[in-house]
Image (tube, rainbow, N blue to C red):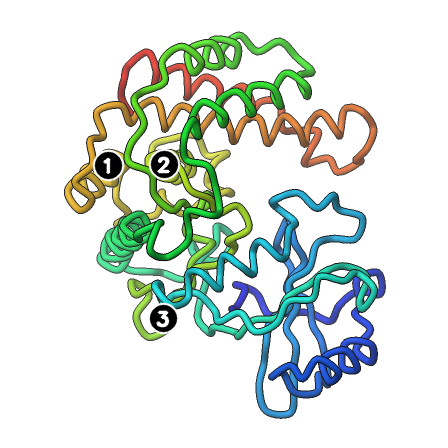
Amino acid sequence: MTMSSNPTPAGQEQELDLSALNNYLQQQGASVGEVISCTRFTGGYSNLTYQLQTAGKEYVLRMPPHGANIKSAHDMGREFRVLQALKPHYPKVPAPLHYCESADIIGEPFYIMEKLDGIILRAHNAPRMNIAPETFRNLSAALIDNLVALHALDIHTTGLIQLGKPDGYVQRQVAGWIKRYYAAETDKIPSMDAVASWLQQQQPSAQVPAFLHNDYKYDNVILNPANLSAIVGVLDWEMATVGDPLMDLGASLAYWFEAGEEDVFKSYNLTWLPGNFSRREVIAYYALKSGRDLSHIAFYYAFGLFKNAVIAQQIYHRWKQGHSSDPRFGALLPMIQLLGKKAADAIEKESL
């Protein structure tokens, strides 16, 4: 498992106690050898990810940020079980090696897995890499092919069904994110009110349930350095669950901005670069490869945009309450308004 940037020495506040870690691993008879150094991957916004260096091999350790409430996004045991369930049936995940439930060893529960090598494309590096349009076109297809493959996994024979409750999944998601929005509301945004109301009233019939990644986009896949259109690994399974697969596709589409759209979104994605599929091409290709009915995809796209707006609203709310001094967070209101408008436009036009 490799981040897009080089790992950097762990800061003092996040430094791991290697002596305690090594003593624990030795006592447990873990397959990981003595850890001689530790570096932290930067750039993530949720769980902490470290590279562990032994005499002959590198591994990856994942743990929650200190003080985090152990909900699904920070549940290391659940994430470890996801990898255990996936690995025999889906090879593009790192092998999970050891899980520690106790917070007494290094301050939080953690797990260790193998490291997968490759390249991750992000908004800050991809535009400078002069990637050929043909490569991006092939990569767009590979990205959707891989999503289709995930959604084709048998959730019953693999045991993945245990990760979620597919019945009523869409309804729970809509209700939950609307509740989060109004809990964090700071400014009246008519488009967000309209979208929230519409999402409650216009939920389509559920698709056959599937395994969902729930954060599937370019910066969560590892690519072959010799062939950037080949996916060798998929990262960040912390939000994986079971439910309507079009919720997964809608979330991906909500990050899929095109060249002619607002410049503000170019710093959050790279789908606008030449050669990438358009959203309509993504939809057509997914429908072709999956055989699923996408006639109500505007609902899933609008929900994906609404969800992204809520996440931004929660961050903005914390800034406005004085819990953050980061000026980037204080500048989020126009983006929230823009995401709400894009969702409302998609609903009105029934088009992406």
> Is 193 in front, or is 228?
193
Amino acid at dot 1: Ile
Query: Measured along the vertical axis of the image, is residue 122 above or below residue 196?
Result: below
Circle 2 crowding by C-alpha within 10 Å: few under 14, some 14–19, many from 20: many
Say which element carries label 1: helix
Q: Earlier in the sequence, mark 2 or mark 1?
A: 2
What is the distance, in whole Å, between disc 1 and disc 3 at their CAs? 25 Å
Q: Earlier in the sequence, mark 3 or mark 2?
A: 3
* Labels 3 and 2 touching (C-beta < 8 A): no
Q: Is residue 52 left or right of residue 302?
A: right
Residue 224, numbered circle: 3
* Labels 1 and 3 touching (C-beta < 8 A): no
Residue 108 in picture, x, y percent from top left: 77, 59
Say which element carries label 2: helix
Residue 25 in picture, x, y percent from top left: 72, 80
Image quadrant where residue 247 sits: top left
Q: Which residue is tagged 1?
A: 283
Query: Is residue 274 shown to the viewer in this render?
Result: no
Residue 224 in picture, x, y percent from top left: 36, 71
Name the residue located 80 percent from the left edge and 36 percent from the top edge.
Answer: 325
Amino acid at dot 2: Leu
Q: Earlier in the sequence, mark 1 or mark 3?
A: 3
Query: Measured along the vertical axis of the image, is residue 4 above or below residue 169?
Result: below
Residue 242 in picture, x, y percent from top left: 42, 42
Q: Which residue is tagged 2?
A: 253
Circle 1 crowding by C-alpha within 10 Å: few under 14, some 14–19, many from 20: some
Query: Can you say which quadrant of the picture contains the C terminus?
Result: top left
Image quadrant where residue 109 sits: bottom right
Say which element carries label 3: strand
